[in-house]
Image (cartoon, grey):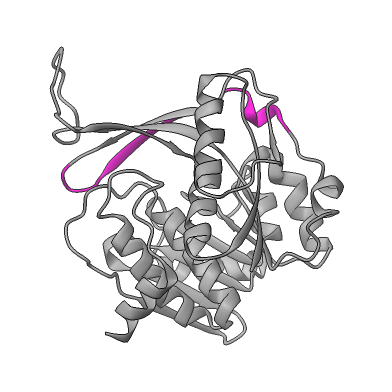
């Protein structure tokens, strides 16, 4: 399947901490607790879908620095084309993720000047009008692209991550133009059952999924006029939950495009994400399609 992806690329450093809140001390020695990887929502989705067997076209922005060279090298190593990566930023974005033994995380994301960029929709879509779906992250340079993609009849999908207001100004363009909408339950102002119906009434999305961590994921399928909950898949020890939402989102898209059934796709996506959180880092721990199918069969 051909999938258009547009989103953030960055260098992510994860740091193991004793717990939250963090008490002050001048130095700590978390042996093998600090790691640095290529990450960013765009990369996480592109890598996950590549591992699942899809053909991805990735659009993003980087600087012209050492970090950008590292990212480009990793993309090529992973078999992800770099033709559509622009080097227009002053510096490449970076992030730091603190995580504790229970898997809770606190993320610091330095986007540099990426929010000042804007992709030209016609230029992007001219060569990708036949893609199966456009997975467009909620970052400024995709704001016009998601509108144009929907107008062009391309299936659109986005993840707005943490949402506390149904009229959130920053995310409104993405919610209005996404046929498939993902978000987390982390900051919801009410129960997920109520909020997911409010979202459908307001934006008329085809599919809405709320990731609920250890409680699984909630699915609203407008075509079937039903709401269901898929329980979480527990594969073992939770190491780091960062990137779990990206894993759930990308694997759902893969299986939904393949089979056309949202509930089945989410069941498989929950397994994919459940395995992924046993690894440290947002862009590691992805399973193949055959791995997931075998687990589902069992």
**Over which residues does the magenta segment extend?**
101-117
- Left or right, residue 1 beside residue 121: left
Whether 291 is drawn above or below 150: the answer is below
Front residue (pair 131, 245): 131
Residue at position x 21%, y 54% in the image: 238
Q: Is residue 110 visible?
A: no
Quadrant of the image occupied by residue 149: bottom right
Against 140, residue 133 (above or below) is: below
For the N terminus, the quadrant is bottom right
Question: Which residue sits at x=54%, y=37%?
Answer: 9
Q: Residue 171 in the image: state x and y as whole percent.
A: 61, 48
Is residue 30 visible from the viewing direction of this image?
Answer: yes
Instruction: Residue 244 in the image: state x and y as whole percent.
Output: 37, 54
Taking depth in this image into account, of 170 and 38 the one nearest to the observer is 38
On the image, the x and y values in percent for residue 295 come to 30, 78
Image quarter hosting the C terminus: bottom left
Residue 222 appears in which quarter of the rendering?
A: bottom right
């Amino acid at each position: 399947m051909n999938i258009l992806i547009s989103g953030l690329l960055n260098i992510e450093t994860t740091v193991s901490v004793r717990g939250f809140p963090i008490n002050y001390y001048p130095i700590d020695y978390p042996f093998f607790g600090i790691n640095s990887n290529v990450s960013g929502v765009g990369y996480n989705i592109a890598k996950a879908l590549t591992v699942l067997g899809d053909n991805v076209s990735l659009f993003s922005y980087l600087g012209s620095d050492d970090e950008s060279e590292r990212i480009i090298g990793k993309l090529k190593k992973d078999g992800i084309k770099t033709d559509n990566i622009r080097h227009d930023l002053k510096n490449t974005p970076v992030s730091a993720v603190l995580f504790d033994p229970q898997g809770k995380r606190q993320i610091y994301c330095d986007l540099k000047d990426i929010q000042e960029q804007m992709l030209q929709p016609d230029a992007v879509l001219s060569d990708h009008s036949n893609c199966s779906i456009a997975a467009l992250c909620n970052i400024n340079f995709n704001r016009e692209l998601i509108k144009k993609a929907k107008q062009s009849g391309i299936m659109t999908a986005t993840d707005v991550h943490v949402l506390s207001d149904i009229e959130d100004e920053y995310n409104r363009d993405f919610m209005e133009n996404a046929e498939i909408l993902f978000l987390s339950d982390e900051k919801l102002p009410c129960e997920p059952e109520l909020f997911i119906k409010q979202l459908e009434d307001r934006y008329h999305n085809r599919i809405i999924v709320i990731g609920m961590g250890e409680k699984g994921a909630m699915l609203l399928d407008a075509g079937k006029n039903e709401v269901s909950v898929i329980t979480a898949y527990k594969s073992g020890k939770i190491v780091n939950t960062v990137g779990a939402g990206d894993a759930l989102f990308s694997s759902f898209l893969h299986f939904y495009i393949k089979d056309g059934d949202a509930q089945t796709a989410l069941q498989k996506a929950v397994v994919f994400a459940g395995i992924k959180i046993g690894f440290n880092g947002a862009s590691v721990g992805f399973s193949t399609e055959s791995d997931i199918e075998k687990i589902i069969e069992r």
